[in-house]
Image (tube, rainbow, N blue to C red):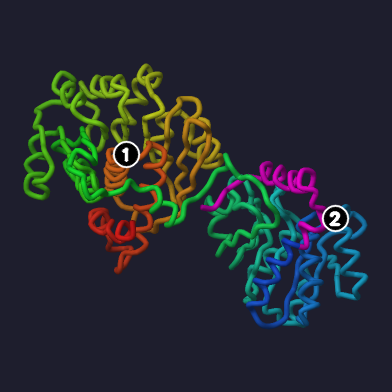
Amino acid sequence: MKYVTGASESRELDKFLIEKSHIPGVVLMENAAMAVTQQVMQHEGSVLVLCGMGNNGGDGFCVLRQLAVQGRDVCAVLLGDSEKIQGDALVEYNAAKGSGLSVLQVECKDDFERLISEKRFSVVVDAIFGTGLCRDVEGLYAEVIECVNSMSAVKIAIDIPSGISADTGRILNAAVKAHKTITFQTAKRGHMLFPGREYTGDLSVAPIGITDNTGCDFTLEKSDVLGMLPERRADSHKSTYGKLLIIGGSDEYAGACIMASLAALRSGAGLIKVMSTKRVTDELLHVAPEIMSFTVEKMRVEIARPLIDWCDVMAVGMGMGQAYGVAEILDAALSSGKTLLIDADGINVLAKHPKLMVKLHDRCILTPHVGEFSRLTGKSLDAILANFTDEARFFSQHYGVNLILKNSTSVIANPQGICCYNITGNSSLAKGGSGDTLSGLIASLCAQGMSAFDAACAGAYIQGKTAESMPFSERTVTPTDISREYSQIFQND
């Protein structure tokens, strides 16, 4: 598991290490620089360290000194006025200068271009701006970053690529496009969210002190997910792994419900019953006779109620349409208090019936993509994308639900305000039906005994990791291909 913080939380962690753990700031810089130096030493050739005037620059001056001790050909460029360097960064600057190391200052873009043309650097270390940057990068800084991005050298960023917002992943006018980023204590939200995720390159998280990260946001790794999965016992039977009810599908959108049902079956639910139209249930009998079906002409709440009483977990909405009766079924499902996943048309019905929103509870999982979330909240796409994590977190806390806000990086938020970032997956998931299979998978994990939040986090990881492991082109992979291969993740559980 990697913990994830934003800019303010990162400052608080540093403050804790300095004030509560009594680790001097310069020692933290030395620890941070050591992790960066180890990465740089994996690459041959001359090294250029670009330093700003803040603590990120202080890390850079320390890297300069450590590399020189290792016998590397290295020099630094200071972007800014040396007279304005303060605190721990000034200590490291003076130590570098006092050691006789080369710290150059450039006055304009031409000076920098002359430097990199006269000496071909193999590695560039980016120590210009850190996680506290909250303004657009302009002037000489932007010009130098443009030059750096055009260089063939390996770019290694300290903490976060300069010009990327640590809170949103947004490019602040100009940003270093790194091959590697070494950050400290925790990953940052800007590393998780695009476009910052792309600019980060390979991310390493280096510890520089001991802190308690309980309550932080996080991203999962495979070992975490395998440890979360319910045990498959030798003395089990079909009811051990839950009774799942899926209400969805229509003659027009038959495939959505079928794909969700197949994903639930292939991920281990014990008993699955589907309430849908005849076209859906007839097809299910052919492709998955293990799934029980209940055929209806129209979605009516009086038909749904006995099925709701039967099940442990429900998934509602995939390909369902928004005809009369759907809102009443959703009302009955919410009123049951049982674990309930709401997807697709279920979310669209919620958006049209605000009175249902007050019935949401902490065993609910909503799975909107950005467009559905816009309809649900009344906020513009731009506003949601600009504050992706905050929007997900606020909604989950306000309504007391678990939310998967789906995008290239999905954010899964719980009622306590903790977020999980899912960074697995690839372009093969950018196809209709991926959301349906994800919903079936998550509902199945819930039926097997996982909590709503854990199932949402693990399901998103499994879906994405399976997509990454497919042995053929992302262009040709389908959602049903992916659900057939869940065993690639499950085989080690």
Tag 1 residue: 449
Figure check: 333 above or below 112: above
Can you say which quadrant of the picture contains the C terminus?
bottom left
The residue closer to the viewer here, 113 or 476, is 476
Relative side of 140 to 176, left or right? right
Please provide the residue range marked out in magenta.
1-30
* Label 2 element class: helix
Instruction: Look at discs 1 and 2 and give the one toward the viewer.
Output: 1
Looking at this rendering, what residue extends furthest in the top direction? Answer: 355
Residue 285 visible: yes
Mark 1 Cα-neighbour bin, 10 Å: few <14, some 14–19, many ≥20: some
* Label 1 element class: loop
Figure check: 4 above or below 32: above
Relative side of 492 to 116, left or right? left
Residue at the location (32% across, 23% down)? 337
Residue 156 position, x and y percent, is 65, 67
The residue closer to the viewer here, 246 or 448, is 448
In the picture, residue 348 is in which quadrant?
top left
Q: Is residue 25 magenta?
A: yes
Mark 2 is on which residue type? Asp
Residue 436 position, x and y percent, is 27, 44
Residue at the location (74% across, 65% down)? 33
Residue at the location (89% across, 67% down)? 95
In the picture, residue 61 is in which quadrant?
bottom right
Q: Is residue 408 magenta?
A: no
The residue closer to the viewer here, 474 or 160, is 160
Tag 2 residue: 88
Of mark 1 and mark 2, the one earlier in the sequence is: 2
